[in-house]
Image (cartoon, rainbow, N blue to C red):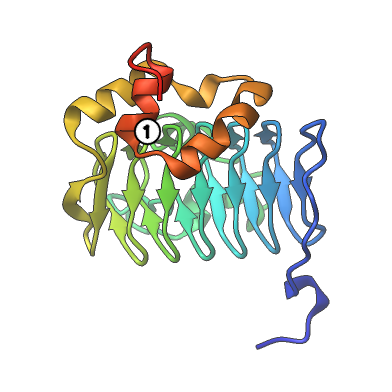
Amino acid sequence: MTDDPADKPRKVAAPRDGTPQVHGSAVVNDSSLGRFCEIKERVLIRSSELGDYTYVERHSELIYTTTGKFCAIAADVRLNALNHPMERVSQHKFTYRPNEYFTAKKLDKAFREMRLTEGRVTLGHDVWVGHGAIVLPGVTIGTGAVIGAGSVVTRNVEPYAIVAGVPARFVRWRFAPETAQRLMKIAWWDWSHEKLADAVEDMQALSAEQFLDKYDGGVEI
């Protein structure tokens, strides 16, 4: 436990105009945050984009990452645990950031660009990343997927798949394939704030299939 005030959670209602909420102890550099985003205590975000309504819990780090909307990032998560250049004589950062150690030496821009492009982590919409999970560079996690707590994700994850373990392996599907396809079709994450407000009680009370029957042109409930 700690007595540091910055580690004590504060319940702050999200402003109705959708302004992102960033805790005073968080660091957000060269990144964009969507409407209604929440960034909690001691989070670090660099060179990343977060979609609307996505929130990041305490002590997590996102670097060179793109998330969709409505993603839930638990505490102590690391999205894009950056690789070191193992093929070089030394894998220490002085080989790609020599400017930090030697006068007149320049940053290895090619290595940084590789991390920005080939090594970028991408999350779809409505992804839940469990406590303490690590996602390695270059991985894409599909919409609706679940990453189990403590997992190390080394390869792409299909939409609506649940994976867990070290390395993370497929556990099961969240929904039957036809249900997942219908959810992708209606793309509720793109609905207006007002339509979401009208639908949230149905999201609470109805099964996924019942919800789809009501909002996908099926039988009214």
Query: Which residue in the protein does label 1 denote?
Result: 143
The spot of residue 166 in percent (x, y) is: 23, 64
Q: Residue at x 45, y 43 (%)?
A: 205
Quarter of the image for residue 114 reads: top left
Residue density around tag 1, few if under 14, some if 14–19, many if 20 or more, within 10 Å: many
Above or below residue 71? Residue 151 is below
Percent x, y of residue 125: 45, 32
Q: Residue at x 70, y 31 (%)?
A: 35
Horizontal side of 177 relative to 101 (left or right) equals: left
Q: Residue at x 64, y 54 (%)?
A: 44
Residue nearer the viewer, 216 or 127: 216
Task: Write down the quadrant of residue 192 in the picture.
Answer: top right
Which residue, as the protein is rendered here, is positioned at the far top? 217
Whether residue 47 is visible here, answered yes or no, is yes
Image quadrant containing the N terminus: bottom right
| Above-or-below relation of 80 to 32 | below
Looking at the figure, which quarter contains the C terminus? top left
Task: Indicate left or right for 147 with 56 as reference.
Answer: left
Q: Nearer the viewer, residue 50 or 70?
A: 70
Q: Is residue 66 visible?
A: no
Residue at horizontal 42 percent and vertical 35 percent from the top: 122
Q: Is residue 11 left or right of residue 176?
A: right
Tell which residue pokes out farthest to the front in this image: 221
Q: Is residue 48 above or below residue 1?
A: above
Using residue 189 as the reference point, say whether residue 150 is left or right of it: left
Amino acid type at image mark 1: Thr
Where is residue 39 drawn, in percent x and y? 68, 51
Residue 31, horizontal then vertical, whole percent: 67, 36
Q: What kind of element bears circle 1?
A: loop
Q: Is residue 150 above or below residue 195?
A: below
